[in-house]
Image (cartoon, rainbow, N blue to C red):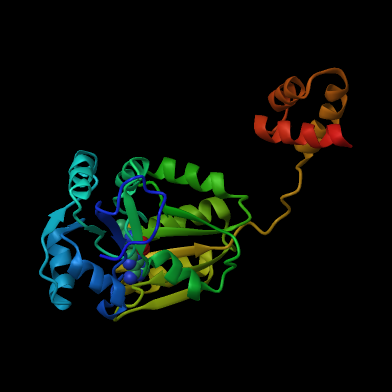
């Protein structure tokens, strides 16, 4: 297969691992390169082989399929390394979208990357990017949050960490927990935060709902069908004042005094202990103040 130059220490006799994105619903979203690559490699690793058979049959790809999932990923790394070293080309696909994005493959790519094997991407669909492209919520900076934790307490804690995060946040959710997750978001972020919910993207019942968290909650409860399928939630970032809070302001005064008497690190450490600032924030602030 065609390979690009890379910083690989291995010769071109080595095989390449292709990380291949596949459709998130509509089979026609498969790229030409994805079909070509999956037809040409020596072996395809898939998260759920029964699921991937359908895709491969659709494109008349009759290639060897082997399972790679969260539970056997680490044991399989040596197998990949041996095959690549023998010059075999391999592909990794997931059930839908881009492998490694809330799907297996990270440890594999990390380890094989460390060993300088050739790894190439065959890019394509990902539900996260597809949802962002139609949400109408700021896309200049966003964080991908994946799935919220299943347990209520941890889920709330994880949202609290994002409460004042000023960037757009993208969450994945399944039909089992969509209502609970939106309720947790309301509990932490309040009723009015702007949100878009992308449901069943590229499939027959594709829908996008745009509104506030409260309106989304009402919309979900209004029709049980709205709770079915696969979802991406795109939530606007915190729009309030993220400048220094009262206690942080006080810590600025405190730091000003401390840095006159103490080394920056020590001054920051003391300021962090008596204020709402983290050590890192206090250290950065101390460095800035020292320059004034
Ligand atoms: N690797 C995939 C990607 O690149 O998007 C994500 C896999 S993750 C296990 C599955 C989750 O992705 C679903 O629970 C849902 O949150 C989201 N998802 C996948 N396909 C979707 C679709 N067609 N519409 C909306 N969300 C989808």
In this view, 292 is above or below 180: above
Query: Can you give x and y, in whole percent of width and height, for residue 250 in the image?
Result: 81, 33
Q: Nearer the viewer, residue 4 or 274?
A: 4
Q: Nearer the viewer, residue 128 or 158?
A: 128
Please identify the quadrant where the C terminus is shown: top right
Q: Where on the picture, by quarter, is residue 212? A: bottom right
Q: Where on the picture, by quarter, is residue 54? A: bottom left
Q: Residue at x 85, y 31 (%)?
A: 290
Determine the quadrant in which ligand 1 lies.
bottom left
Q: Is residue 79 visible?
A: yes
Q: Where on the picture, by quarter, is residue 116? A: top left
Q: How many marks can you see?
A: 0
In this view, 228 is above or below 170: below
Q: Residue at x 19, y 67 (%)?
A: 40
Q: Nearer the viewer, residue 291 or 80?
A: 80
Query: Can you give x and y, in whole percent of width and height, for residue 273 in the image?
Result: 69, 23
Q: Residue at x 39, y 73 (%)?
A: 222
Query: Can you give x and y, in whole percent of width and height, for residue 236 in the image?
Result: 58, 62
Q: Is residue 176 visible?
A: no
Query: Can you give x and y, in whole percent of width and height, for residue 108 in the image?
Result: 29, 45
Q: Residue at x 67, y 59 (%)?
A: 239
In this view, 187 is above or below 123: above
Q: Is residue 210 left or right of residue 108?
A: right
């Amino acid at each position: 297969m065609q390979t690009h130059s890379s910083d690989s220490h291995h010769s071109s006799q080595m095989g390449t691992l292709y990380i291949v994105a596949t459709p998130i619903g509509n089979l026609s979203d498969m790229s030409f390169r994805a079909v070509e690559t999956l037809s040409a490699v020596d072996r395809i690793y898939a998260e759920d082989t029964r699921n991937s058979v359908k895709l491969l049959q659709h494109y008349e790809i009759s290639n060897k399929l082997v399972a790679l999932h969260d539970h056997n990923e680490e044991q399989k790394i040596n197998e990949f390394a041996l095959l690549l070293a023998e010059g075999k080309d391999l592909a990794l696909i997931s059930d839908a979208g881009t492998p490694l994005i809330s799907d297996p493959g990270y440890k594999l790519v990390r380890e094989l990357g460390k060993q300088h094997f050739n790894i190439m991407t065959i890019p394509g669909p990902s539900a996260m990017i597809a949802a962002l492209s139609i949400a109408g919520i700021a896309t200049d900076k966003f964080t991908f949050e994946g799935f919220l934790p299943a347990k209520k307490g941890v889920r709330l804690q994880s949202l609290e960490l994002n409460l004042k995060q000023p960037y757009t946040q993208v969450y994945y959710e399944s039909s089992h927990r969509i209502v609970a997750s939106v309720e947790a978001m309301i509990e932490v972020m309040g009723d009015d935060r702007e949100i878009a919910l992308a449901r069943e993207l590229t499939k027959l019942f594709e829908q996008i709902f745009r509104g506030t968290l409260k309106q989304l909650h009402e919309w979900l409860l209004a029709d049980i069908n709205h709770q079915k399928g696969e979802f991406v939630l795109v939530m606007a970032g915190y729009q309030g004042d993220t400048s220094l809070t009262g206690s942080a302001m006080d810590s600025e005064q405190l730091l000003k005094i401390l840095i006159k008497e103490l080394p920056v690190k020590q001054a920051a450490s003391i300021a962090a202990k008596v204020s709402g600032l983290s050590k890192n924030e206090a250290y950065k602030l101390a460095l800035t103040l020292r320059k004034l």
